[in-house]
């Protein structure tokens, strides 16, 4: 691996994530082109290398061998005469269907060109290809770009491509306004429209973006597999939630996606405010059947305004997605990838017997980079949980209201929030106890909280901007009675040190 020139102190700026991916400098949004090849996980991303706000889009690039440590690489794709480089995916062309690789395999990026027609000045979006014969270090534009254009559609972007084994061809899942369009191709160069999904299905109050489609076993049963379609929905000022990601579960035959649930069922991937445009890795080795996902940890409502300085934007932890059968039907589960355990440097076991009521600081870590694991046994319903990053004036509350059966994050006093009026809020989502118990796994990383409840049944991802001196981990219980069965704090390392 090449060494980046390390400036000291590195990755210690105010609010800088310690163990999440963030760009060395300047702006980041969506994860792009995630592909595994020759022992490396590639992470490309929407990047503006000349500023800390959104601007002419490039693909930034990083690689990892363990999903934990990341090496920054030079910008992979830059704007060209067709347009700037919007979101898209990358695949390994194992059988050289493109003919780019002289019979060998190589990487192909399929991305959106966002351009302006020179004659009319009208905007357009079209899909283009670039390929690499050196493990993604350098890229060649395909001379036949763009490969897919539709004059009649203004929002026509974010191609996610995969090889569909059964029909022996490539499938492209594309965001097309308020729908998702499926195209097929033998060679990534010529594409035919197969079907369109989405009319009257799910949530439509915002433009549809960044789709992904993949198959997963239900409850680990390989004989019962279902397809999951992720669709991110852009910000709509009428909704406090801003931009967020929904998902559908159903079947896909290589041409058409059929939703299993009624047209008005909306399933949200994450119930926090800051997990958007997430997609999954392609081409994991055959020995690894996981579906690994990363999202952009921000929200278009205020993404350009968050109070970091020389950089802006970070990714969620890589998460393993799975499907579980529940009383309501099949649902997504998410947990940090098992590799995340390697982040732990020290574990503090805070065993407590009974916390009936009141508040108390139970631990003060040296820095706000830790994983907290707790299990509660609810004896009599009340409200309880943790105030994290707590100081004299600040706290981020991750709590459970056992009467309402809701998990919540309250970031109304979490620190800096004056950059947008909708930031300082409390939000909640339904969560049923399991045999009277609730389990929480919470990752805190200087400017974010990621909550995984009941083994990944519910996730909430939020940005927070606390003062670095606000470090208390405070237990609270109001009314009712709850037994804290276990409480562990794992201190997590700075992956850039
Ligand atoms: C989603 C998105 C994509 C687009 C990209 C531009 O956040 O709007 O639809 O390709 O960002 O940066």
Image (tube, grey):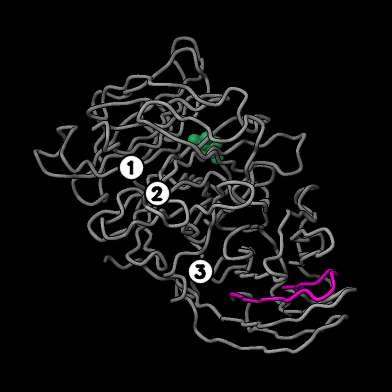
Q: Position of residue 209 (x, y in %)?
A: 53, 34
Seen as rendered, the residue at the extreme left is: 102
- Residue at point 85% right, 69% down? 382
Q: Residues within 10 Å of mark 3 (few under 14, many from 20)?
A: many
Residue 394 seen anywhere in this rendered image of the structure: yes
The residue labelled by disc 3 is 19
Q: CA distance from mark 1 to mark 2?
A: 9 Å
Check contact, mark 3 vs mark 1: CB within 8 A.
no
- Residue at point 76% right, 72% down? 385
The residue labelled by disc 2 is 44
Q: Is residue 321 magenta?
A: no
Measured along the vertical axis of the image, is residue 93 above or below residue 487? Answer: above
Q: Position of residue 178 (x, y in %)?
A: 58, 25
Q: Nearer the viewer, residue 391 or 202?
A: 202
Q: CA distance from mark 2 to mark 3?
A: 17 Å
Q: Residues within 10 Å of mark 2 (few under 14, many from 20)?
A: many
| Magenta extent | 371-388
The residue labelled by disc 1 is 90
Tell me the number on the disc at residue 441: none
């Amino acid at each position: 691996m090449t060494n980046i020139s390390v400036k000291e102190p590195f990755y210690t700026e105010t609010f800088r994530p310690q163990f999440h991916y963030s760009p060395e400098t300047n702006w980041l949004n969506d994860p792009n082109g995630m592909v595994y090849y020759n022992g490396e996980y590639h992470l490309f991303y929407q990047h503006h290398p000349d500023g800390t706000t959104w601007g002419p889009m490039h693909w930034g690039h990083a690689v990892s061998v363990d999903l934990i440590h990341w090496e920054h690489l030079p910008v992979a794709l830059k704007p060209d005469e067709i347009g700037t480089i919007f979101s898209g995916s990358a695949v390994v062309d194992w059988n050289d269907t493109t003919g780019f690789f002289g019979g060998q395999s190589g990487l192909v990026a399929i991305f959106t060109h966002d351009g302006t027609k020179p004659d009319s000045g009208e905007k357009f979006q079209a899909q283009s290809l670039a390929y690499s014969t050196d493990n993604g270090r350098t890229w060649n534009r395909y001379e036949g770009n763009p490969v897919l254009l539709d004059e009649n559609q203004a929002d026509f972007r974010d191609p996610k491509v995969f090889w569909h084994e059964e029909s022996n061809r490539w499938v492209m899942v594309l965001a097309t306004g308020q729908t998702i369009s499926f195209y097929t191709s033998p060679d990534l160069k010529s594409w035919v429209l197969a079907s369109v999904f989405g009319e009257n299905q799910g949530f439509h109050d915002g433009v549809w973006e960044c789709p992904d489609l993949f198959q997963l076993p239900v409850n680990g049963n390989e004989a019962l597999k279902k397809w999951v379609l992720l669709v991110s929905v852009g910000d709509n000022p009428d909704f406090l939630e801003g931009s967020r990601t929904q998902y559908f579960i159903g079947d896909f035959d290589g041409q058409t996606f059929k939703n299993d649930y009624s047209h008005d069922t909306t399933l949200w991937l994450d119930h926090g405010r800051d997990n958007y445009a997430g997609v999954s890795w392609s081409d994991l080795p055959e020995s690894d059947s996981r579906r690994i996902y990363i999202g952009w940890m921000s929200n278009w409502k205020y993404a350009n305004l968050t109070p970091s300085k020389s950089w802006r934007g970070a990714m969620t932890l890589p998460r393993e997605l799975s499907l579980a059968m529940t009383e309501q039907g099949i649902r997504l589960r998410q947990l940090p990838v098992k590799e995340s355990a390697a982040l732990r440097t020290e574990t503090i076991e805070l065993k407590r017997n009974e916390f009936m009521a009141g508040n108390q600081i139970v631990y003060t870590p040296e820095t706000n980079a830790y994983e907290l694991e707790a299990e509660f046994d609810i004896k009599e319903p009340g409200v309880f949980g943790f105030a994290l990053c707590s100081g004299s004036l600040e706290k981020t509350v991750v709590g459970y209201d056992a009467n309402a059966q809701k998990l919540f994050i309250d970031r109304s006093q979490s620190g800096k929030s004056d950059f947008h009026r909708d930031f300082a809020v409390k939000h909640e989502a339904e969560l049923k106890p399991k045999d009277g118990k609730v389990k929480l796994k919470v990752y805190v990383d200087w400017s974010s909280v990621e909550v995984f409840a009941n083994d990944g049944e519910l996730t909430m991802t939020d940005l927070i901007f606390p003062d670095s001196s606000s470090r208390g981990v405070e237990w609270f219980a109001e009314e009712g009675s709850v037994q804290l069965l276990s409480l562990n704090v794992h201190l997590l390392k700075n992956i850039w040190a």
